[in-house]
Image (tube, rainbow, N blue to C red):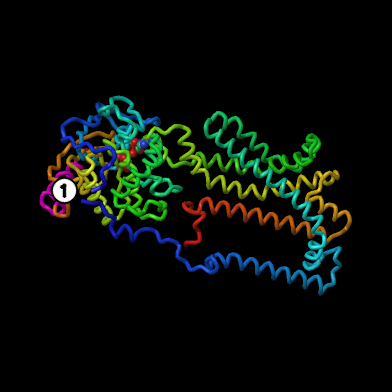
Amino acid sequence: MTVLLSANEAADAPLQDRAPRHFGLTAEAWLRIIAPTLIGLLALAGWEALVRINEIPPYLLPGPVTVFETLIREWPSLSVSLLITLQITFAALAVAAVLGLALAVLFAQSRIIELSLFPYAVILQVTPVVAIAPLIIIWVDDIRIALLICAWIVAFFPILSNTTLGLNSADQNLADLFRLYRASRWQVLRHLRLPTAMPYFLAGLRISGGLALIGAIVAEFVAGTGGRASGLAYRILEAGYQLQIPKMFAALVLVSLTGIAIFLAMSLISHLALRHWHESAMKERR
Amino acid sequence: MPEAPPIAPVTEPRGPASVISLEGVTKRYANGTLAVRGVDLSVARGDFVSLLGPSGCGKSTVLRMMAGLIPPSSGRVEMAGGGETGDIGFVFQEPTLMPWSSALRNVMLPLRLGGVGRQTAERRARDALASVGLAGFEDSYPRALSGGMKMRVSIARALVTKPRLLLMDEPFAALDEITRHKLNNDLLTLWQAERFTAVFVTHSVFESVYLSRRVVVMAARPGRVVEDLAVDAPYPRGEAFRTSADYAAHCREISSALHRAMEE
Ligand SMILES: Nc1ncnc2c1ncn2[C@@H]1O[C@H](COP(=O)(O)OP(=O)(O)OP(=O)(O)O)[C@@H](O)[C@H]1O
Ligand SMILES: [Mg+2]
């Protein structure tokens, strides 16, 4: 006698995604790209029309065309600043990810450690970074490290709290199964708790990506008012002082684009890491 | 028939020797709930025993004590030969698979946790998957499988260590009837081929009669064993048995035992 799968069970298996694809993406995915892009273009056209019809001078409100021209013209100096801001943002995000994960794992090992340290992580989170940035900039000689610390403070908490939650969310029956096979603490962590925490960690990373940029920009503003920085925020300040409003807009546009790019990059990482198994990576199927 | 496993299944005759026994076992949970009281139960090697009873009568509690997942408050739970890792397989009501791992890796888990090398573990997991009818689904992730297929993976995982004792806690309760019948038959085939001892928790009188040689009926508040009945029909059992007068008689007998248990 051989055990064979019945047609009934096989037919019951969830259907794989068979939606037709155009240039690698489904119609739904294209819609998700095209619709917001169209809205954006319309808004830009309206803005340009408003500026031209009312003949608003560029030092009050430059039109998108002027902003774009300025962006191209000022690219050499802006790109240097962009690079500096990006370095700080990603360094802060990387440190936040590594430390957040490590601390969450530590918390997961011992309830005492979690209970004694978690409140301080919360304090770190609720303290406005604008308020402590001046102190940090005074205390830390290297301005880049000072900025990195500020951005890290903002980016750290979501990763820590999300990952801690994830590590504690393992399925109870699976945990019993690991006990049945007498898995070591390390095996439980490696094969059960960390994989369970993965979607939580990635969701934290997605939030922290944007926060790290905001943290870096805020700190640059604080440092910039002291004349000690050269990141994008400093360019905005500088252009403001010199009443070069189009340049201010150009730097602002760069900040926004960077934020969007970081969000998309984190979403992509998350999607690639979870595509086989997690609900969040499967929404196109409905 | 599944391929010859690396560790040959014991072909010893089914003797009266018990694989696991509970003596005067009482379980009171930390919150004060008295889940079971004074349970004596001994399962003979190679037997197929069903635990049948109303909700909350402590079936899962008994099963989890057999597995060593929870300790009894008093009394003794003893596994013949001590009980090595991998001696006991457990199947939950939910498939309880790791969603981030393929079917193959899920089935490899018990072996990997026990320190078996990757290649050996992979070969044995493939064999186990094939033995439950899932050859070709090694690389599927759980979410791509139907409920019945997931349960098959779960059974393959429980059997991959060649356990002496397979504990199942209402494994097919969430499946549709056609699938449940099919899995009942396949479980019996595996049981006959691999000669493990089976303890099967169920709510269903029909399922308990169809599968087992012995039905232990439990009552609630506090949970205890009230009746112990033999189903002496020969194996292999199939559709012929399901429609026989013998089957109907056993169902009636056990059904009324269950009724008495619920009225007590
Ligand atoms: N971890 C626990 N802590 C406290 N009480 C529990 C726990 N687990 C079960 N109980 C209680 O013990 C009693 C027996 O529960 P158990 O799950 O063993 O019953 P069961 O026969 O498996 O029920 P069902 O058929 O619903 O699965 C119930 O009253 C239940 O509420
Ligand atoms: Mg139960």
Confirm whether the magenta stretch covers residue B254.
yes
Magenta stretch prevailing secondary structure: helix
Q: Position of residue B186 (x, y in %)?
A: 24, 50
| Residue pictured at 70% horizontal, 47% vertical | A89
Q: Which residue is mark 1?
A: B236
Q: Position of residue B71 (x, y in %)?
A: 34, 28
**In the displayed structure, would residue A267 be above or below residue B58?**
below
**In the displayed structure, would residue A196 be above or below residue A40?**
above
| Residue pictured at 53% horizontal, 45% vertical | A198
Q: Quadrant of residue B70?
A: top left
Q: Position of residue A112 (x, y in %)?
A: 55, 28
Q: Chain of mark 1?
A: B
Left of A252 or right of it: where is A167? Answer: left
Judging depth in this view, the residue of A142 and B34 nearest the camera is A142
Q: Quadrant of residue B29?
A: top left
Confirm whether the magenta stretch covers residue A286.
no
Judging depth in this view, the residue of A1 and A121 nearest the camera is A1
